[in-house]
Amino acid sequence: SYKSKFIGKEEEHLPSGDYLDVSFKDKNTWVGVEVKSSISNKDDIIRGLFQCIKYNSVMEAINSIIDVKRNIRVILVLGGVFPSSLIPLRNTLGIHFGKI
């Protein structure tokens, strides 16, 4: 069976001037990761949620420009606890979440 071999890269530059904290790619998938530390406050986490939306759009645009059909996924990863008050926003935006 085929096993995916992701190539990981830190601080991948996007044409929008942004940087993905971590990026994983193979021929079928591109995963962008926005990382927030354990000391990130609520406002920084909200900013991270919206960065994920932006990165997803930019990554989709890159796929279109270079005519690649990779599946795009952007994940917000926190070193701390995700505030329960932000769960409705995260769910509305459809952001995938992970914990370090």
Image (spheres, grey):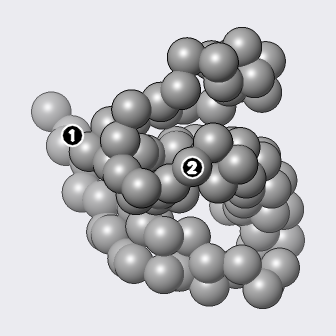
Q: Is residue 21 above or below residue 74?
A: below
Three-letter residue code for mark 2: Asn
Nearer the observer: mark 1 or 2; the answer is 2
Q: From this view, report whether residue 76 is shown above or below residue 33.
A: above
Asked whether 44 or 67 is in front, the reply is 44
Q: Position of residue 3 (x, y in %)?
A: 19, 43
Residue named by callout 1:
2
Which quarter of the image is occupied by the C terminus?
top left
Name the element at disc 1.
loop
Residue at point 62% right, 78% down? 19
Q: Earlier in the sequence, mark 1 or mark 2?
A: 1
Give the residue type at disc 1: Tyr
x, y percentage for residue 59? 72, 61
Question: Which mark is drawn over residue 26?
Answer: none
Horizontal relation, residue 41 to residue 93: left or right: left
Seen in the picture, residue 8 relative to 28 is either above or below; the reply is below
Which quarter of the image is occupied by the N terminus? top left
Q: Give the residue at x 80% y 63%.
A: 58
How many dots with numbers?
Answer: 2
Q: Is residue 27 visible?
A: no
Residue highlighted by disc 2:
41
When asked about the image quadrant of residue 92, the answer is top right
The residue lying furthest to the left in this view is 1
Q: Where does the image place residue 8, in percent across and percent down from the top left?
A: 32, 69
